[in-house]
Amino acid sequence: MKNLVFSRIDDRLIHGQVIATWLKTLSNVEHILVVDDKVSQDPFMQEMFSLLVPSHITIEIRTVDEAAALLKAGLPRPTMMIVKVPQTIKRLIDQGVDIDFLNIGGMGMSAGRTKLYQNISASEEERQIFKELMAKGVKVEIQIIPAQKQTDMKKILK
């Protein structure tokens, strides 16, 4: 996928950890694409996220369908994509978006989720999505922050 530098699942989307650590590590990133149907309709959250991003980084928040079209057309700048849930990645891939790597950063405990790995939780549906993605050749790794060792999802979901 042209200019898709990094794809991440983080249920908080934009927060200090993403901005402070990942953008330093991914120094070539010029743009952040947040993909979330609900947040794309929430002007308050859009404003909050835009205030957290450094001025030299652009940000856009799109629905899954809008993002699929953008990604398939090719992104104009090196981009970090952030989504809340695995279902979003599955929907993008089902619409023909080519994603070869997925970072799992933050999936907190909530209704229907159980502990998957350390502080990462997932529902049975989300676990199945990870298995589907890996079967399609997507490399799925858990890494909360860049300083942490990467953990291959294949070792966790056997």
Image (tube, rainbow, N blue to C red):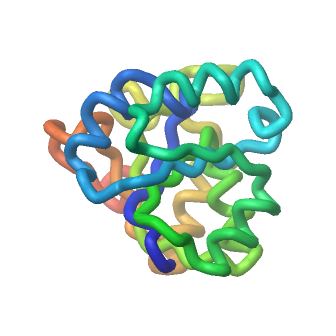
**Of 80 and 43, the residue lying toward us:** 43
* Horizontal and vertical percent position of residue 47: 66, 24
2 vs 57, nearest the viewer: 57
Residue located at (51% from left, 36% from top): 10
- Where residue 144 appears, as percent x and y from the top left, is 32, 35
**In the image as oriented, which residue stretches furthest toward the right?**
41
Using the image, determine if residue 69 lies above or below residue 143.
Answer: below
How many labels sit on residues?
Answer: 0
Q: Is residue 144 above or below residue 66?
A: above
- Seen in the image, is 55 located left or right of residue 47? left
Q: Quadrant of residue 39?
A: top right
Quarter where residue 49 is shown? top right
State the residue in front, 131 or 4.
Answer: 4
Frontmost residue, 117 versus 13 = 13
- The residue depicted at 48 percent of the width and 70 percent of the height is 134
Q: Is residue 98 left or right of residue 153?
A: right
Residue 25 appears in the picture as rendered: yes
Q: Which quadrant does the C terminus fall into?
A: bottom left
Q: Single out the residue that lies furthest toward the front.
A: 55
Query: Residue 72 appears at what percent x and percent y?
Result: 66, 79
At x 34% / y 46%, what residue is drawn? Answer: 142
Task: Tell me if 94 is positioned left or right of 24 in this view.
Answer: right
Residue 93, horizontal then vertical, whole percent: 66, 71
Task: Find residue 12 and report its image quarter.
Answer: top right
> Is there any visible trace of residue 114 in the rendered image?
no
Instruction: Using residue 23 as the reference point, say whether residue 112 is left or right of it.
Output: right
* Residue depicted at 39% across the width and 32% down the height: 54
